[in-house]
Image: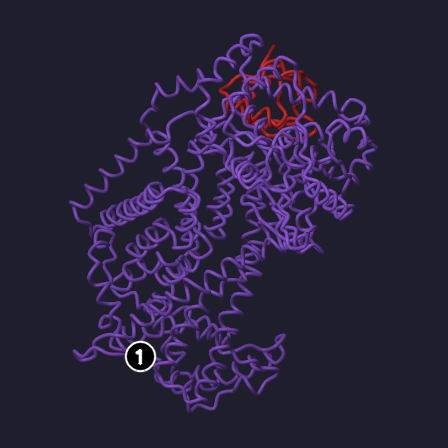
Amino acid sequence: MMPLAVADYGTEYKILKIGGNNEVKQHLADLGFVVGGKVSIVNEAAGNLIVNVKETRVAIGKDLALRIMV
Amino acid sequence: MADQKITIALAGNPNSGKTTLFNGLTGSNQFVGNWPGVTVEKKEGRLKGHKDVLIEDLPGIYSLSPYTTEEVVSRNFLVDENPDAILNIVDGTNLERNLYLTTQLLELGIPVVVAVNMVDLIQKNGDVIDTKKLSRELGVDVIEISALKGTSIMEAAEAALKAAETKKAAKPVKFAKDVEASLKEIEGLLVNVPDHLKRWFSVKLFERDDKLPENVASLAPKAEEIITKIETAHDDDSESIITNERYEWIASALKGTYGKKGSGELSVSDKIDKIVTNRWLALPIFAAVMWLVYYISVTTIGTFVTDWTNDGLFGDGYYLFGNGREEFTEDMNAYYAENVWTDEVKDNVAKAADAGITGADEILASIEDQDYEAFDEAYGFYGAELDDKEGGVYSISETVDTARGEDAEMPANEDYGTWVPGIPVLVEGLLDAINCNDFLKSLILDGIIAGVGAVLGFVPQMFVLFAFLAFLEACGYMARIAFVMDRIFRKFGLSGKSFIPVLIGTGCGVPGVMASRTIENERDRRMTIMTTTFIPCGAKLPIIALITSALFKGASWVAPSAYFLGMAAIIISGIILKKTKMFAGDPAPFVMELPAYHWPTVGNILRSMWERGWSFIKKAGSIILISSIVIWAGSTFGWTDGAFGWNPDLELEESVLGAIGNGVKWIFAPLGFDNIKATIATVMGLVAKEEVVGVFGVLDFEGLTALAGYSFLAFNLLCAPCFAAIGAIKREMNNAKWTWFAIAWQCGLAYVFAFIIYQLGSLFTGSGNIFGGILAIALVACIVWLLVRPYDEAKKLTAVKA
């Protein structure tokens, strides 16, 4: 298990755990980040990531990427 | 049936094509932006061909949780207004996530019809959706549409209409057995809500939603026991249980309905993103794009059109399609060469230039270029200088004024090509023809047309700027800017999303402040609302231009320094406020959908440009019209030889406006501009920033040094914005206390900045006041301390733990 922030580009991962408070978790879930779901990194800029989740591109900050465990 | 109104609510994810569908169904003018959260307020329109059917366009949302303002607006509407049906538009290329909202809409006890959008794209990708099976799974009608091409959209509306008439409420999706059992138990507690809302409220109670009506929220303690039991069983919190149940249901429902061809390779959008969000290239690309936008809208097209509006439409007049302009200019130059630029004049100007009289070199250059327009401009600015200095030995005014006077036989505009007189000329002719009295004539020409015209002159420039911003927004680049800027803004306690309001604010603060709605975190949103108007908006540009040309001889550093000052005010406010108790806490994490790039339609861009531009014109038509009349009345009513009355040639000092300015000017003494006109201009600036230039249009800058001028500029750029923007702040804050706090913060910060600039500046130039200088240094030290003091550690720890 590792945070998404350090994962490799282009590889598809399964989300194992999502940390953070309920508000943050809920918003992530609304955008498609759920435990068991698939995610892959498309691009990165200074720690902020562009990821592919459920076929949409979502930009997330580094702090969030550290809370999504894959 | 015909007399009964039917309401259909349009709901869907951001970027699912909802607004396009709304426009298609109602034919109404509404902007479609490729920026999550464009529809921040619900809009309504009538269904084409069905006068009795009202379509309500709800904001784009991902779910009905209480997370963002948009979500709360939408669910309040759906629960309280109880529409007859919901038309749920889902993006067919991203069914899994879009259906998440659908599963929640099905719980509201309202008939639902699902419209799967972008079927053309799905077919192009070679994917297949089995809508019949999907319809069976969801238990509602599913219709394939293409909102962009208008395919089957009326069928979708008809289906929603039919659903509304049969009043058959949608059935919620079934969760796992134990979850269902708990929900049933909670439903049993809900005796005081309507039957159709029982499922909805039981789920919300289960999720411990904190934005429930009083009669439901009061049941929370009773439900707690049921919730805790199932939480222990699942080893998860209740909200996550429901979320997982929903996604699991979707996954099973989509099995066999959605055939997807192989993916995994990078799309065109991804390839563009690789470049424009690249670690090294992102900022240079962004800077280049913004430079291009401003270069085109402010210096080229914008200036050209603005000049035409100011000098032509609201000036003397213009040549239709330039027909006749060249001949006229040629003849004018020849006339000037013979009558104005006499040997004596040339000699005097050359001598004045040698003696270093301000502006003499500019006049000289215009004579050498044989350019009468440049000469008129330079002479208008600096002619008086030549008269004043050294007892008038360099004066050229006698020759020039005679040659340009009323009796001179100058070439006349009307004799060349197709000359169209300007509005003031036409109106003056009309008023003279009907023998209008002087009072009314002055009111109409000097008050209304001069005031409103000065503002409207600047509309074309704003339109060009708005068109560019709309393009950036619609093509998808704006969302990337937020992503790129986030890493910089984060350091100042703001999120990347705060940058979009600032960017739009460079055009006009009103849409800028409104754009802050896409920021989910309330603290961040408030802070963005408070700081957005620090950036110079379109209306502040003329102030900068005026001060630059009048006091700094057009120095090129003044305008960029104004933007720099604005950014500095935003950053300093961000850091200082973030460290106060009110704004403390974890900076909200950055999450944002990046829509795929696409070419926006011309109609779309024009619509957005028109919508924003029109709101500016409406402002000019109302607030600015009234304030123009007030200024005109204030400056023409006053005391002539001790008797109060109306006098169009009144000196400002003797007018009512002058008396008011005189009374309050002491406030600005520490800032260096305790000058009546500067004071009036500042006060009128609160009504509308455009008025500052209106007041100063006749100011002779007496008693203002360059330093005081810059201090004046700084104060006017940073202090509370115009009434319209203050109104927007009040609407967005939705709280009187916060609105006043924002205004006080803006005015206070402006005062402190201007004070420091003026006092330290005078200290350096050697004319300073020791007391003022010490106070200014103390203020700088105080700001530095506020900037570097540590964050509240205790707060940070709890945030991390959470």
- Tell me which residue sits at (28%, 80%) in the image: B647
Quadrant position of the N terminus of chain A in the picture: top right
Could you say which is closer to the camera, residue B552 or residue B243? Answer: B243
Colour chosen for chain A: red
Look at label 1 and name its amino acid. Answer: Pro
Quadrant position of the C terminus of chain A in the picture: top right
Is B549 on the left or on the right of B327, as rendered? Answer: left
Asked if B436 appears above or below A57 in the picture, the reply is below
Asked if B380 appears above or below B98 in the picture, the reply is below
Residue B656 point in image, percent of width and height? 24, 70
Residue on which disc 1 sits: B648
Is B399 on the left or on the right of A27, as rendered? Answer: left
Asked if A20 appears above or below B490 in the picture, the reply is above
Could you say which is closer to the camera, residue B101 or residue B316? Answer: B101
Residue B758 point in image, percent of width and height? 26, 50
Residue B67 point in image, percent of width and height? 51, 30
Could you say which is closer to the camera, residue B571 or residue B700? Answer: B571
Mark 1, other Cα within 10 Å: few <14 / some 14–19 / many ≥20: some
- Tell me which residue sits at (42%, 31%) in the image: B493
Residue B289 point in image, percent of width and height? 59, 46
Q: What element carries label 1?
A: loop
Could you say which is closer to the camera, residue B7 or residue B702? Answer: B7
Colour chosen for chain B: purple
